[in-house]
Amino acid sequence: MRFGASRPKQYLPLAGATVIAQTLRRLDCLCARAIAVGLAPDDSYWAAVRPTLTTPLLTFVGGGERVLTVLNGLAALGGEAASGDLVFVHDAARPCVREADLRRLHEAALESPDGALLARPVADTVKRGDARREVIATVDRRDLWLAQTPQVFRFERLYAALSAAVAANELVTDEAAAVERLGGHPRLVAGSHDNLKITMPEDLALAEIYLAQQDSRSG
């Protein structure tokens, strides 16, 4: 089952802070010009958990769908970003992303006109099911990847791709899909297994273990 908590999952406690605070601290290593954080219109938690970072933080009101939230974020960054600047889009609920992966992703995005994203090759056997949850096919997993975040694109390219998707009433579920529908080929960068997205209650405990393991290896 998914979270039934009294507050949004990004504000749940994790390793002495909150999920979103841990996530933002990971992104702080990028030395970006700014980090824009999308908030719900009625958010009442951010002010109390806002972390202190070296990177300037700004907030904006998110949209009803991911694609709309990212577009709002790009608008909020409009005064900070040039058309060719790289923009990292990351899930607040992925607090375990590794600095080394962020560095490799940045390098790949600099080399690719269509951007880049962290992803993991599919390791398990993949089945396609029908409405009755009966297997109808086994899918060849070769060349299949599970998309993660961050996903990184040049500002103008991303804005144009997302705007075109919205105009076509296609609510793409990640930024790479928007670039793909315009003929782009974002680069896949192999991410780490512990860059999990907190979705279920057990993911929170697993994220705490991952953070502790990462801290012990860097210490």
Image (spheres, grey):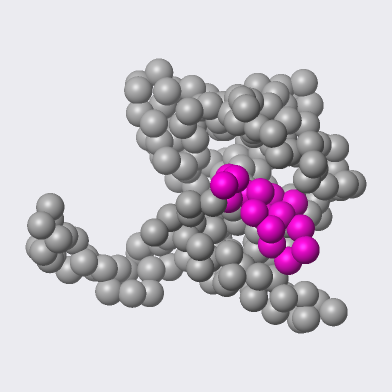
Percent coordinates x, y for residue 59 in the rendering: 73, 30
Q: Would residue 145 be found to the left or right of residue 201 on screen?
A: left
Q: Estimate the x, y position of residue 205 in percent, counting from the top left.
A: 59, 70
Q: Quadrant of the C terminus?
A: bottom right
Residue 122 x, y percent position in the rendering: 38, 68
Please give the range of residues in magenta: 6-21
Q: Residue at x 26, y 68 (%)?
A: 126
Q: Residue at x 12, y 66 (%)?
A: 135
> Residue at horizontal 53%, vertical 27%?
63
Residue 144 showing in the rendered view: yes
> For this rendering, which residue is in front, 194 or 112?
194
Is 20 magenta? The answer is: yes
- Is 18 placed left or right of 5 in the picture? right
Q: Tell me the residue at 48%/54% (across/down).
A: 3
Task: Decide if residue 135 is on the left or right side of residue 94.
Answer: left
Farthest residue, direction top: 167
